Amino acid sequence: MKLSRIAVIAAAFLTMSAGLALAEQTVIQYDCIPNYANWGGVTKAYQKKTGVVVPPDMKGSSPSMAALEAERKNPKADCAYYSGAIGFQAASKGLHESYKPKGWEKIPAALKDPNGTWWTVHTGHVAILVNTRALKGKPVPRSFADLLKPIYKGLVVYDDPRFNGTGFTFVAGINAVLGGGKDLKAGFDYLKKLDPNILKYAKENSYNELLRGEIPIWINADGNGLKAKNVDKAPIEVVIPAEGTVTMPLVMGLVKGAPHLAAAKKYLDWLLTGEAQLLMAESFFQPVVPIKLDAALQAKFPPKSAYAKAKVIPLDQMAAQADQIKKRWEKEIEGGR
Amino acid sequence: MPSKTGFVFCLTLTLILMAVILLPLLVVVLGSCVNASWLGLSSDLWSGSRHDIFDFSAFSYLFQNYGDWALFSLELALGCVAICLLVAVPAGYALARHPFPGSVLVEELVLLPLSLPGITLSMALLAAYGELRGPLLVLGGHLLYTIPFMLRVVTATLRSFDVGRLESAARSLGASFSQRLFMVILPNLRHAMMVGSLLVFAVSWGEFNVSFLLNRGRPQTFPAVLYDTYTNQSIQISSAATTIFLAIVIPAVIAIQWLGGREAADLEQGA
Amino acid sequence: MPTPDHIIASQPASRGAKRLQLAPLALCAPLLLLLLALLVWPLAHLLQQSLLLSEAPASGLTLHNFREIVLVPRYRDALLWSLELSLAVAAGSTLICLAPAWLFTRYSFPGKRLMRGILTLPMTFAGMIVGFLMIILLGRAGFIPQLLERLTGQPLLSGAGYRFPGLILAYLYFEIPRATLTLESALAKLDARLEQAARSLGANHRQVFFWVVLPVIRPALISTFAVTFSVSLGSFGVLLVLSLRHFSLLPLEIFTQYLAPPTDQGLASAMSLALLVVAFGTGYGLRRLARRMEGARA
């Protein structure tokens, strides 16, 4: 009797797994965080349109690149999404296939690789996202310098640059924003001074915690904050710091040896269509393809004047220094007693 | 006569520990369906905008989006149970009743994963089988953690005075191996196999660290849903996911206690 | 005269025919195969990886990675902190869980099984989950601070989860089941007659506990300590979620070295093996000590 029970369980197991394997067409995208740039909504729309499932993937930019490197001989992912510099780095490591999706010509030259190993899908900026209710009456910080004030002790969070692309862009870019030089001293001095006010260096996505008020001040992409404010109706204010900010192109690439090549190409093509770009714009990331945004949506973005001091840092430069910057951050800011 | 004050002291401390363990779970289960402002808590910081006192929409969201992950975890757990029964029961019999040179080493090796850091085991599996990342490798990781439980329960039962004595008596009366197997050994092992299966199921269902590192793509195991939802979804949804997780694990744990905590307790006595 | 029971039971069943020697091996064969494939072979690979430089794998075997663990302050600190934290958690949980273990072995009362069931629940939770529970309960916007704010007007304990006591509490949370079960099984083997004898000689309950029971259960305390120590040492999920500033643990460093570029596989492997050696070595050593103490008593 025992043996027959076991046989039944084993048979059920095998048939179920076989069944699930044939279930639906998928495209695997590394770094497909539902609440970052509304990938949840974008992939859902794609599924509704074509029936192809793009499942969520919680890896940040850097872990995605590491995963692709580890899987070089036997790729599991079809495409990956990164914060600009990391995507550039991944492409230069030969992890991507050259591919120019439909609509390629519409992307500005500065935002893509001439050979098609990476291209921008939308752009964000580093901003200060504030949950005003969680601040409990404290004034909203308006600049990076404000964040250094002692009243914000234990209230500020930014993502660990080793795990998260936006966090990396902030750590790498703050130097340029503060007018520092090649030695990056200005930037790292600032981060050192900011450290006492930091609650934690988050290693995973903190969107939910910002909404809840668990994290009162989050340094992240403006688009995420604007979505929290306008779509999720949370008491969030998005502050473009007075000193300026860093423009952050968010890029994608087709993985070399993608398992679902044809489906992946169709998916990447679709992401540049007006339909997809509009969805991304509705989540407040700047579309890379020129599309018409209606006035009501446009009004919800911060005024263009706020971005007057936005710095554009060449991606190749950031990518070349990426490993050094992470190690230096690990040593000088995070490490030690 | 055991001391009265001792009883009260131990009971109080134990009740406090129980409260500590239950509190977050209760909060989470409530958070999945009860509107926080009704609970008297400062509202939207916790639950966003909801109007009803009870609201189970989070559960339907989860079933829609992560139903197959739950199924995958259940399959893995049942698969572990099947493999453990097939592999560990005969081996347990051999090791307990017919020891051979090296059998002590074999037992120590089997129990080894329980005292090793999970990340070491994951890294070792990845070093050897990196390219095979996926459901099969996850199953392998789970087996490393579940076989020791089944083996321990079986050997503990077989080494216990009663079963050993019965089998030897049967042998000395001339019973053949298959007669001993079906009339003495298996019936006595039934209880151990049930407890073992429940333990294997619970351990596999809850296993996350190794599965997280060894799996790729989808579906992932159910605890990964917890990770997903805690970082990316609202409190209602992550609480609902935790509630589902508990709904599967609690009955298994209670069943183990009901059937006989002694076997379960014996296992934990280190490797 | 019939053979005494204890002699029958102690005879291994396989004395005699050579044919029988192969059968147990055959029964163990699938298990041995799995052990080889899932444990021995991968650990060998890990060892090989740890002895190679990740940037220059062809340059041959070297102990460089192991030296890094000791030389680089960051990793050395992580290892030391791991040891300190695990020692503290092991000691704490062993002592605290004496109470429930004693309760379950010495007394019976209704609801005992339910209580034991609840106490063993956290054993199935991953470290990360416990971290999240900690934030929900004691984060900046946690349940307890909010409740306390409602009651007293001050958000007491807000953010307590992100400080060291919160970390220890989270670790204790999932160690309680293990410590309780291990202690319970060891205590159950205690002979109650020792206590009765002491009492019949006039000792009161407290004297009996401190002078008779405690010395006898020392080996049990040591094995429990060993088990909880090994498990705490390997756990990093809690810290990954709580992300305490300026604090790291070796398993988290392994995780980072492996998952977040620039990665160093060789270093990650070396750290994994170092952790293995410490965890297993301490655990095994302590358990041997405990068994010897038990044996000496017998």
Image (tube, helix red, strand yellow):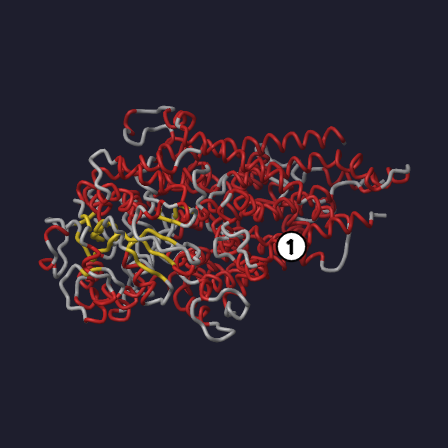
In this rendering, does residue A247 appear at all?
yes
Which residue is rendered at x = 45% and y = 72% of the image? B50
Q: To which quarter of the image does residue B258 belong?
A: bottom right
Foreground of the two, C108 or B150? C108
Image quadrant in which the C terminus of chain C is located: top right
Q: To which quarter of the image does residue C89 belong?
A: top right
In the image, residue B111 lies at what x, y percent?
56, 40
Foreground of the two, A183 or A18? A183
Image quadrant in which the N terminus of chain C is located: top right
Judging by the rendered image, the residue that carries numbered circle 1 is B18
Which residue is rendered at x = 64% and y = 50% of the image? B264
Foreground of the two, A126 or A330? A126
Foreground of the two, A100 or A159? A159
In the image, residue C4 lies at what x, y percent?
81, 40
Residue type, mark 1 in image? Met
In the image, residue C77 lies at what x, y percent?
45, 31
Q: Is residue A302 above or below residue A311?
A: below
The reply, left or right, for residue B246 in relation to residue C61 is: right
The reply, left or right, for residue C276 in relation to residue C184 is: left
Task: Please identify the residue farthest to the bottom as the structure is shown.
Answer: B52
